[in-house]
Amino acid sequence: MADDRFEAGLQIRREVMGDDFVDAALSRNAGTDGEELQRHITDTVWGSVWTREGLGKRDRSLLNIGMLVALRATEELRGHVRGGLRNGLRREEITEAVIHASGYCGAPAALSAMKVVQEVLEAELGPRTPSGE
């Protein structure tokens, strides 16, 4: 059962975060103390939480962006903005999520997050056009 959960987690983690991201995280931690943490996260967060019914991947990505803003977890935010795009979020929705989070998490958290969001959006989608497209 645990191996099934890990495999399911690995599959969905790859779908959301991309093979390059997952391969880098796993190889960076292979043979280190962090290897067990990567296995645990893949097993529990991705294999138990992300595989639950009730919310789609798009909704989970939107929630993650807000929570990562609140935590000021900008390195994790970078990957989850890419995952959100992969899961169907639009540039405007990601930006609005950060603006919305600013009301609850504060301007410093939102400003810090927006720097990362902007870098990822420009890298993935190019510069924002005047019409916002």
Image: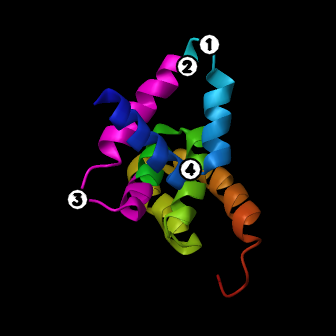
* Residue 94 horizontal/vertical position (percent): 52, 65
| Element type at mark 2 | helix
Residue visible at 50% across and 59% down?
98
Q: Position of residue 131 (x, y in %)?
A: 67, 88
The quadrant the C terminus occupies is bottom right
**Pointers 4 and 2 in contact (C-beta within 8 Å):** no
**What is the CA distance from the residue labelled 4 to the residue labelled 2?**
18 Å
Q: CA distance from mark 2 to mark 1?
A: 6 Å
Which residue is depicted at the point 56% across and 46% down? 77
Precedes in sequence: disc 4 or disc 2: 4
Q: Is tag 3's residue or tag 1's residue first in the polypeptide sequence?
A: 1
The residues tagged by marks 3 and 2 sit, at their Cα atoms, a distance apart of: 30 Å
Give the CA distance from mark 1 to mark 4.
22 Å
For disc 1, the marked residue is 32
Magenta residue span: 35-63
Q: Are marks 1 and 4 in contact (CB under 8 Å)?
A: no
Residue topped by disc 3: 54
Disc 1 residue type (three-letter): Thr
Q: CA distance from mark 3 to mark 1?
A: 35 Å
Q: Which mark is residue 17?
A: 4
Verify CB contact (< 8 Å) between mark 2 and mark 1: yes
State the residue at coordinates (67%, 52%).
115
Q: Quarter of the image containing the N terminus?
A: top left
Q: Is residue 107 visible?
A: yes
